[in-house]
Every structure is written in C-alpha cells, then in structure tokens.
Amino acid sequence: MKKSFVVFLTGLIAMSCLAAPAQARKDPKIYDHARAIPTRSGENVRITLYTKRIRGLRVRVDDSRKMRAQRFGTGCGELRCQRWKVYAVRLEDECYDLGIESIARPGEPALVAAMTVCEPFRNGSI
C-alpha cells in the first residue's frame, strides 16, 4: 500500500513539474478591436487600443510619424486587458489606418499589427 502511494505521488509530482513551464508562459496579444472618438474641439481624435501583456506600443496613424501610445487603465471585463490611447488629427473620411508595433524587452520578439478603425457616428450624427 505504501509503495503504490509513493509511486502515485512521484508520478503526480513529475507530471506537475512537466506541465508547469507550459502554463507559465503566456504570449502577449494585440487585440483587433479599437475605437476612434473625436475630442471636444472636433479637430483631433482619440484612438483607443486594447492589448494584453505588452510593455509599450508605437503607433503610426495613416503613415504619419511613429507615436508612442499612453497606457491609461484596464478594460475588457474579466479579461483584464490594457487600454492605450493615442491622438491623431481628424480626417474628412473619419477612418484611420493604424500600424501598431509593440515595444519588447531585448531578446523577445515584437508584435506587429495593422488595422483600420472608424468613428462610430459619421458626420456627427447619432
């Protein structure tokens, strides 16, 4: 009885040691969801991006210069994602092409994403 218990316990410990490294590494994500909301002045737009486990973001809006996004909280409900904001000049068509690049630690691969985000209420109408 004692020998079978020891064998069972040793097997259980071995399985947990092998499974732990696979669970510990979680990959960073850039979600393909973003929001573009005009500011009060109507001249600029605030673009909100959602990520998970990212240190920093560099964003290009419509092939402009690279801008560094600012982290300003968490969101996504139970998923607890990070929210980032970047400001851009408001355009006539109210849609913006984004080029997103994550800032990674040395030795880690950087994530790259591209998406188009549009304002929800076109021409100021609801």
Image (cartoon, grey):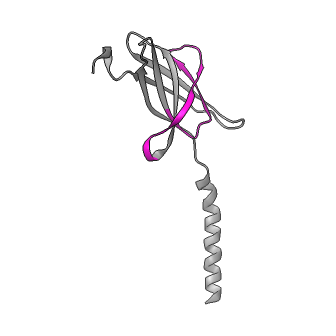
Extreme residue toward the front, this view: 40
- Image coordinates for residue 83, horizontal then vertical, percent: 51, 34
The residue located at (62%, 33%) in the rendering is 110
- Image coordinates for residue 32, horizontal then vertical, percent: 45, 32
The residue located at (41%, 22%) in the rendering is 37
In this picture, is 15 found above or below 110?
below
Q: How many marks?
A: 0
Which quadrant of the figure has residue 16?
A: bottom right
Asked whether 109 falls inside the magenta stretch, the response is: no
The residue located at (62%, 35%) in the rendering is 55
Asked whether 73 falls inside the magenta stretch, the response is: yes
Q: Report the quarter where the N terminus lies.
A: bottom right
In this picture, is 123 found above or below 117?
above
In this picture, is 37 found above or below 7?
above
Q: Which is nearer the eye, 76 or 41?
A: 41
- Image coordinates for residue 94, horizontal then vertical, percent: 39, 15
In this picture, is 47 found above or below 32?
above
The residue located at (55%, 13%) in the rendering is 64
Q: Which residues are magenta?
A: 50-78
Judge left or right: residue 14 versus residue 123.
right
